[in-house]
Image: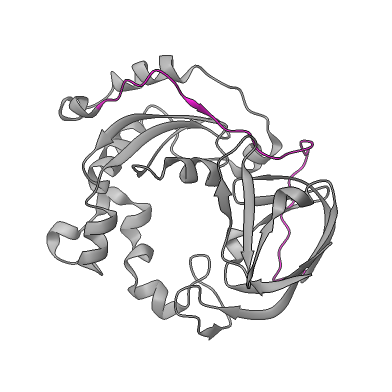
């Protein structure tokens, strides 16, 4: 039996991906629980994943309201990088902005529910792809800053989706595509000033998840309405524990105190 506040998964990028769930002082290897019935109980307490204060509601997956409105990682430009306002001198934390946004970023193609375009910090791509449940991915450009990556992503969204259908992703109803060929087509759509950033690596990355079987219908468990989930775990993908009768988005409940047992 394990008790603690959820903070999301940690991954080891093997075949399949190894999912570790830090909980309290323990690190639970969730792959070992696939195929078994487990019980997850929300104990009614929440705390901010940044400052640790006791709260009654979380914002942006685990923050208290003051941290949500003050931390740079919760600013709107994180989900809309093309609206970065660092150069205007209004960044919530300029030092954080330099460390996280004024550094090389990849723009990539990934197959999750279908093909999508996205962006991530260079050297963070595997975490990003696994968090999205991508089964295949490839970088298509390396640019100097997050804002430039966001601007290119917005431009390319005219030609390929920039969102993941999480239900389709969890069902595993996905058609794999030749990302090398698609990359060439998409790079032809780059604005002239971005063509210097195009990448030409010869291989894409395939990602395998610990899944015993696919589900036909996706029903989301809600710990706010159903404090106890007891079900057979049949897989893990993206941010989700996949059970026989429903799925649980672990990241959504960051900051929730839970008890997990077999």
* Figure quadrant of residue 168: top right
* Figure quadrant of residue 10: bottom right
Q: Quadrant of the C terminus?
A: bottom right
Q: Is residue 155 left or right of residue 68?
A: left
Residue 185 horizontal/vertical position (percent): 36, 16
Q: Is residue 218 visible?
A: yes
Furthest-bottom residue in view?
A: 54
Residue 86 higher or lower than 125, as above or below: below
Residue located 61% across and 23% down the image: 175
The colour scheme used to paint the residues is one colour
Residue range highlighted in magenta:
198-226
Residue located 20% across and 65% down the image: 94
Residue 111 horizontal/vertical position (percent): 53, 30
Q: Is residue 199 magenta?
A: yes
Residue 148 horizontal/vertical position (percent): 23, 42
Instruction: Determine the main secondary structure of the stretch shown in magenta.
Output: loop
Q: Is residue 258 visible?
A: no
Residue 17 horizontal/vertical position (percent): 62, 41
Residue 26 higher or lower than 54, as above or below: above
Residue located 79% across and 70% down the image: 1
Q: Is residue 26 left or right of residue 132?
A: right
Q: Is residue 97 left or right of residue 257?
A: left
Q: Is residue 154 magenta?
A: no
């Amino acid at each position: 039996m394990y008790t603690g506040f959820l903070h999301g998964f940690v991954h080891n990028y093997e075949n399949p991906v190894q999912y570790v769930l830090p909980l309290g002082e323990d690190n639970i290897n969730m792959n070992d629980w696939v195929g078994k019935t487990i019980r997850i109980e929300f104990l009614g307490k929440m705390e901010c994943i940044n400052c640790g204060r006791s709260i009654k509601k979380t914002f942006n997956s685990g923050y208290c309201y003051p941290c949500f409105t003050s931390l740079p990682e919760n600013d709107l430009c994180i989900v809309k990088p093309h609206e970065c306002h660092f150069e205007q001198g209004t960044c919530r934390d300029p030092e954080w902005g330099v460390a996280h946004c004024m550094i090389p970023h990849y723009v990539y193609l990934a197959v999750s529910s279908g093909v999508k375009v996205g962006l991530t910090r260079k050297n963070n791509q595997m975490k990003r792809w696994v968090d999205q449940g991508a089964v295949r991915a490839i970088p298509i450009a390396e640019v100097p800053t997050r804002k430039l990556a966001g601007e290119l992503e917005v431009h390319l969204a005219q030609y390929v989706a920039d969102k993941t259908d999480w239900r389709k992703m969890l069902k595993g109803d996905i058609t794999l595509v030749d990302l090398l060929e698609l990359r060439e087509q998409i790079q032809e759509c780059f604005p002239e000033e971005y063509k210097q950033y195009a990448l030409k690596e010869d291989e894409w990355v395939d990602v395998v998840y610990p899944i015993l079987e696919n589900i036909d219908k996706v029903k989301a468990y809600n710990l706010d309405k159903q404090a106890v989930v007891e079900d057979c775990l049949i897989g893990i993908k993206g941010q989700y524990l996949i059970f026989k009768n429903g799925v649980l988005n672990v990241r959504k409940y960051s900051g929730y105190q839970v008890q997990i047992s077999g």
